[in-house]
Image: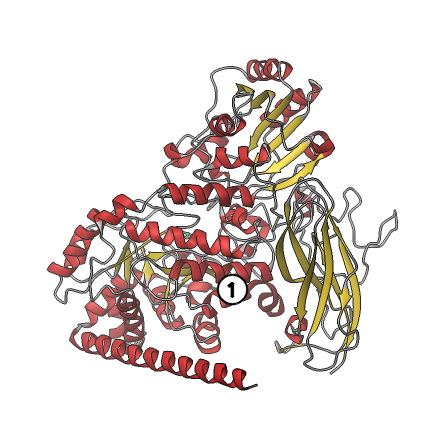
Amino acid sequence: MKKTIVVACSLLSMTAGFAQTKTSADAKMNSFVTSLMGKMTTEEKIGQLNLVTPGGTVTGSVVSTDVDNKIRKGQVGGLFGITGPDKIRKAQEIAVNNSRLHIPLIFGLDVIHGHRTIFPIPLGLSASWDMPMIERSAQIAAQEATADGLSWVYSPMVDIARDPRWGRIAEGSGEDVYLGSQIAKAMVKGYQGNAYDGKSVMACVKHYALYGAAEAGRDYNTTDMSRIKMFEYYLPPYKAAIDAGVGSVMSSFNEVDAVPATANKWLMTDLLRKQWGFKGFVVTDYTAINEMIDHGIGDLKRVSAEALKAGIDMDMVGEGFLNTLSQSLKEGKVTIQQINEACKRVLEAKYKLGLFEDPYRYCDEKRFANEILTDDSRKAAREFAARSMVLLKNSNNVLPLQKKGTVALIGPLADNQRNMLGTWSVSGDFAKSITMLQGIKNVAGNDVKVVYAKGCNISDDSVFAKKVNAFGTEIDIDKRSPQEMIDEAIRAAQQSDVVVAILGEAADMTGEASSMSDISLQPSQKRLLRALKATGKPVVLVLMSGRPMTIVEENDNMDAILEAWFPGTEAGNAVADVLFGNYNPSGKITASFPRNVGQIPVYYNYKNTGRPYHGGPTKFRSDYLDVSNDPLYPFGYGLSYTSFSYGDVRISKLNPKGNETLTATVSVSNTGKYAGEEVVQLYITDPVATVTRAVKDLKGFQKIKLQPGETKEVTFKITTEELKFYNTDLKYDWEAGDFIIQVGGNSRDTKSAKVNWSK
Ligand code: NOJ
């Protein structure tokens, strides 16, 4: 007892100490910024709200012009799209030496899944369900970014996506709100650390809000949903990032409740700042203010004023603020307080990053030389990539491959550096990436003979290829005819013991503006796979994709399927590590794989409806005539080279009351031959409530490692927090009654127990 008191007291004094330090730091910042703003003209204040790009990362039609001059005139608050301590120093020197008040610029960039060392795409990272690893990936990215002159990154992207047609599903963490929120938190922690110490960056959570719910999966399309759905399934990851202390927020392109997010005061001020207590600054997405003209909100002057009034602080690229706010101020359309507020928030961000103290804090040439693409970061990239892969099928234990015999390595992605990094790897150098062919040679050893053939083009469609190749030749259409390539592949297969086909998407078949209405393999690739199958050799499909694809035919015909996503710089080594069993796959998909496009959206936490389908040829139930309701692979699914068995769910108390805490425990055993990791998942169903609830929701998970024959007890703590939901008054609370507690290795195959929880 005595001991407890001592600990509690010391904790209290520590917290009080922190609070005091924070308050005095805040007071110092406040007085610095207030005094600086006292010297600024209105024009200079508006200048701070202007974020420009001289090129580099261009995701729209406008690029800023006359940038140097604008910096001199105090018309620029930040720059994005340039990297390198030398270039950034030069730009910073213009601001610091030549602008009237010497205010430093903030330098940002899209650092999404690694900076120079590229990790798997975020959808892949999420499939690891490994929070320390994801946090570490952000930390390494921050270290490289700060060594490269940057202090601000446009990540994490936390948009929940239930539609794999949407190309940007690759950039997020899939369909689940609970997992998405955990990842949002881990990434903010990884990027920002505990303090901006020069090696951490300010994160920017995006795209606030609901961007992932674009109708029909078409990028930039309208979103429209009930408030309950918003609060329950789409908003929590942004909130998790805010709670984790994220320094900035990016507004989304889409509308929310019929008002574009960028002019949506409810979203930007009432919810974000007043309800959630966000204290950082909000930047728009690329020309999002200007795009409100096309949304039908008004001319540039009007949309810029609406954005400022809604709570936007910084205008990315479009210069609507720069060119119209003074006039709007004169006309009384905006107030000086609104301009002051925005300016203050931008200056505070610079202050927190230490830029006033040392504008060149992130311009260290030595760090640039020593801390980028190091052996350690490449090692991490290899490990993270292996941990992100998901084994979707493995009949007759064809995997892992033996380190002997002949392997036919087939496919347009097999000897292809260009496509290993995936979308949004703007600072990654694909020439530094390891191909599958190289990786397999590195890992398999001298007893394996590898016979390579391209086999087909990623796509034979030259018009499609031209669109995908906007940033360079990712789809390279061979001079040989498709039949010649297939023939060569068949000859290679015939000489081999096993065929490994590396197929899927080119890097920019997902990502921004890369939505697809057909998410199956391209016809050229399907033809190749059929021909390979016809040789009678076992065929392993390594699928590279930035989205769940529709692969029913491949699931029926291939012996094994490994989802490798876009693995990043160390792609080939990591895939080979998994294929040859140096690493036993442990990833679990975080977005359901539909059987066909007509099923979309298909996600695990759907609602029952009044006519749920329970199988059989019954009429008048909620189903399809031509396809099952179930996805091909459910959320949370993924195999291992070993097997796991789950015992029954044991609940500590079947009739809890009020705010009691329960535990749900299962025994998980490794019943196979290999050591392996398993993601043990907890789902809860609330069968009766005043509003309809999903059939189940993820409420916890643990990733455990088991040796062959080993059993571990996995215990989840359950409180009434896990039972809460939003009712029609948007009140977040729980209701008494029965709850089904489920634990399993994916969202479909669970063991369950029932509790009755009373108030
Ligand atoms: C547009 C994208 O939507 C956003 O994610 C990105 O951060 C900006 N462009 C800046 O490149």
Residue 734 at x, y percent in the picture = 68, 76
Task: Look at the image and tell me whether residue 605 can be seen.
Answer: yes
**SS class, disc 1:** strand
Q: Quadrant of the N terminus?
A: bottom right
Q: Nearer the viewer, residue 187 or 300?
A: 187
Q: Is residue 501 above or below residue 52?
A: above
Task: Look at the image and tell me whether residue 695 can be seen.
Answer: no
Q: Amino acid at mark 1?
A: Val
Residue depicted at 67% across the width and 75% down the height = 720
Q: Left or right of 637: which side holds 211? A: left
Q: How many marks?
A: 1
Q: Left or right of 541: which side holds 644? A: right
Residue 596 at x, y percent in the picture = 68, 41
Residue 143 at x, y percent in the picture = 34, 53
Reading the image, the residue beneath label 1 is 256
Q: Is residue 57 above or below residue 264?
A: above
